[in-house]
Amino acid sequence: MLPSELKLEQFSAYPPQAHALVARNLLVLRVLPLSLAPNLLREVIDYDYKFPAEQMRIDEEFKTLAGLSPSDREEWLRGFASISLSKRIEQFDWVNDPVKFSEQQSAYLWSTHQMDAFRNAANEYYSRLSHAIPKKPLALQRLGISVIGMGVDAYDEPLFQNLKSHGTLFNQLKPDNGLELLLSAVEARAQASPSEYEHWYIDGGTLIRQPQGITCMSYASITPMRSEMLRFMQKEIQTPGMGPEQLRSDMAAMTPQKLGAASSGNQVLDRFQLKVLSEGSGTQIFSTTFVQWTTREVLRRAEPLTLFERYAPRQRQRPMNELLTESGKEEELDPKGSLMDADMGSYYHFINQQRLEGFDKSVFLVWWEGHKSALVVSPTLPRGTTSGSVIDLGELLKVALG
Amino acid sequence: MQYEFKGTNVAGFEREVALSVSRSRRDFLRGAAHLALGSAMISASPMVRGESARKKRKVIVVTFGGGARDQETFAPEGQHNIPHMLNELAPQSTFFTHVTNQGILGHYVATASLTTGVYETLNNFSAVPPDHPTIFEYFRKELRRPSSDAWVVAPSNGFNRIGESDCKNFGPGTGATVILPKHLLSAAARGGTANLDHLLRDNYESPLFTPTLSGGEFQIQQLESILRLSVSDFMSHARTLSSPDELSLYIAMRLMQEEAPSLLWITMHDMDVAHSGAYSLYVEGIRRTDRLCGELWKAIQANPEYAGNTTLLILPDFGRDSDLDPGGNGFQHHRTGDIASRTTWMMALGAGVKQSVLYDSPVQSIDLVPTIGAMLGFSATQSNGKPIKELV
C-alpha cells in the first residue's frame, strides 16, 4: 500500500490520542513518500505514551508539513521520493507495525546501497524542519551534571580528555558533601521551574534520596522490570529457530503489560523504562550502559532543563549467556572499568545536551565522585584551562551558572 | 530513522564528522612512527618478483575486528592503545590511511565482501556462503593449490561459511577450510566448559546465532591429525588464554607450524563487545588485538616457512559510528553508515612491501582481493575491486 491510499479506518488499533492525531493529519500523511510516512507513523503510534516535548515536536512537524506549498513540499521530500522500495516492502502492513517496517526498510536500503541516500534525505529533511519550527525560550539555562567514578580511589589514566578543550578543569575542589550539594541544586531548579519531565535524576545504583519535583530512575529501581526482561530474553534464546533479528523485533513489540512488569501508575514512565531495556543494547546487563543510554534517550526525547546522572560500578564482563541469566549470586564489580565507561558516557551526555535548543547557554559539569577533580563547560568559563580554585561543588555550580 | 535533535544543525554535525575524519587521516602516524608520505607513482618493492618467488610467497590477512575507529587506534588520541602496531609494525609497513567500505556494515557480510572483492548483500545473521567466489577459491583453482594451502580462522560461529561460495565453477570443496576455535573448544570440552567460559564469549549483537555447521569446517578429529595437538593439550593450553581472539591466534600459529599455508585469513572479534556499551571493554579488546598482531608478526619472523616471504595485511573490517552522529550512539554500534563507520586504515608489511611509507589516497576494502591476487599470481575475475598499485 502507498501513503496516497491511506484511510482513517486503517488506524482503528491506534491509541486514542494517536488516532485523533492521524484523523487531523490524514491529508498530510497521504502526500508523503513511502520511505518517510511509516517512519513518521512509528512516532505517531506511541503518541499517547510520549513526553510532552515529543508530542509538541510531532504536532509541529505535521503543522509545518501541512503549511508547505506543493512546490516546497516536493523540494523538502525529494530525497525520500527518490528512494526506491520493493513491492514486498510496499505490501507490508506498515500502518499497524511501522517499527517492523522500518527494520525491513533499513535492511533493504543497506542491501541496495541506498542507505547513504536515505541518510542524506533524512538529514536534509530534519535540518529544514528544525529551522522551520519556531524556537521557544527556555525557562532556565540547560544544566547537565555527570558524577563518575564511584568506588575508585586511584586511577592512572587521564580523565575528561574529550571534554577538556570545551571547558575548565578544576583540580582543587572541596569534595565534602558534593553529592548532596549537587542534588540540592537540581532540586532548587525544579522548584524554580516546576514542570513534568523537565528535571531528571538517573542513578546507576540506588538513588541517594528521592528529591522533590524530579523524575527519577535508577538501576536498582528498574531491577524488577530488568529481571523480567532477562527472563524474556532467556526464553526467546531457547526458542527453536530464534535469531537476533527476531529477538530485536519481539523486544521492540514488548509492553509493560506483556512483560508482566508491575505498573507504577505512570504509563509514560513505564513505557520509557521498558524502551530503555528493550531498545538499549547492554542496558540489561551493565549499569554504566543503563545510565549512558537512559541519559541519551531522556535528552533526545524529553529535552529536559536539568539532568543529573550518577554512574555506579557495573558488573565484570562474563560470557554473554551468563550475563543474560540472573544467577542470584552477588555480582563481582569492575569499578575502574566503570570509571572509563562513565568518562566516555559523560562526554556523550555533553554532546547530546549540545544538540538541544539553548546549547550556547547550556552548562555541563562532570565530577569524579569524592575527589577534587571536575570539569565544567559554561559560557561564563574559559575553555581548555585549569583552575586551582578551592571551592565546593555548590559554589562551583553557582560560578558555572553565572 | 529517529527524530533528530533540533538544537544544532544536523548537517553541521555531518560536516564536523567529515572534517574530523579527514583531519585524523592527515594526522595518522605522523611524528609517531616516522613514516614518509608516499607518492602514487611508487610501486611495491621488486624484491619478490618472478614466478619462483611467487611459488613461495605467502599472505596472511588479519581483520582487526570487529569494527575499530580511528580515534581508538591510529588517530593521535588513540595511539596509546596500539603500542605494538604503532612502534613495532608501522615503521616496517606501507600504511594506507584511507580505506573505505561502501558495503553493508555487518561483520559477517563485510568480511565476506573482503574475501570476495564484491560488496556482498547476504543476510548478516544467516549461515549462507558468499554470493561470489572467494579469494581462497581463486587462489586454489588458478594456482592448483591443495586445500591445506588456504585456511580461515574465525572466532564467531557465524563465520563458518566464509571459506567458499557456491558459485558455478567454484564452490564446495574448492575454498578454504574454516576453523572456528570457539566451536572447536566447545566440542573438545564436550559440554564441560568450566574455566573456559571466558573463551566462549559470544558476540553481543548475536548471542543467539549458533548455526548448524556443515561443509568445510575443521573437525575435532583433525586437531590431532592436522595440528598434531591432542584434545587434552589443546584444553590445557586454552586454560592459559584470556579471550576468544587469543584462542584464534593460538590456532593460527599452530596451523603455521604444522601446515604452513600460503594463504591464511584470521578474523579477530574481541572488540565487538562494544555493542554492550562498555567503552572500557571495547578499548581492552583493541589493546589485546594490538598485542596479538605484534605476536603474530614475531611468529612470522621466527618461522622459516614464513620469514622473508610473507606479506601481512592488517585492516579493520570497518569503523564504528562517530561520537557526533545523532543517529548513532558513538562507539557502541556501526549502524549509521556515517563516514567514521565507513572509513578505516590498512597496514601492509613484509615481502614485497616498502617500509615506512604512508598513503593518504583512498582505496576500497574490496581492493584487497585483486591486490592479493596480483601478489600471488591469480586473477579475481568477479571482484569489483582494483589492485592497489602501491602494493603490486
Image (cartoon, rainbow, N blue to C red):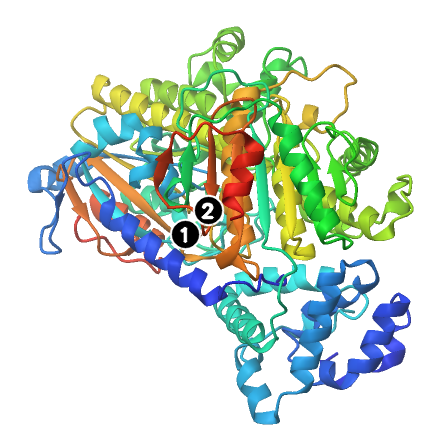
Is residue A172 left or right of B4 when viewed as pictured? left
Is residue B239 left or right of B302 when viewed as pictured? right
The residue that label 2 is drawn on is B320
The residue that label 1 is drawn on is B340
Compared with A291, B80 (above or below) is: above
x%, y% of residue A382?
38, 46
Upstream in the sequence, badge 1 or badge 2?
Answer: 2
x%, y% of residue A192?
71, 51
x%, y% of residue A126?
56, 70
Is residue B230 left or right of A291 when viewed as pictured? left
Q: Which of B176 and A154 is in front in this view?
A: A154
Q: Which of A357 and B324 is in front in this view?
A: A357
Q: Identity of the amino acid at label 1?
A: Ala
Find residue A111 and report its image quarter. bottom right
Residue sticking out furthest to the bottom: A70
Q: Name the residue at 55% across, 75% down.
A: A83
Mark yes or no: residue A286 visible. no
Q: Identity of the amino acid at label 2?
A: Arg
Q: Name the residue at 77% across, 19% down.
A: A327
x%, y% of residue A328?
79, 18
Mark yes or no: residue A249 visible. yes
Q: Mark 2 lies on which chain?
A: B
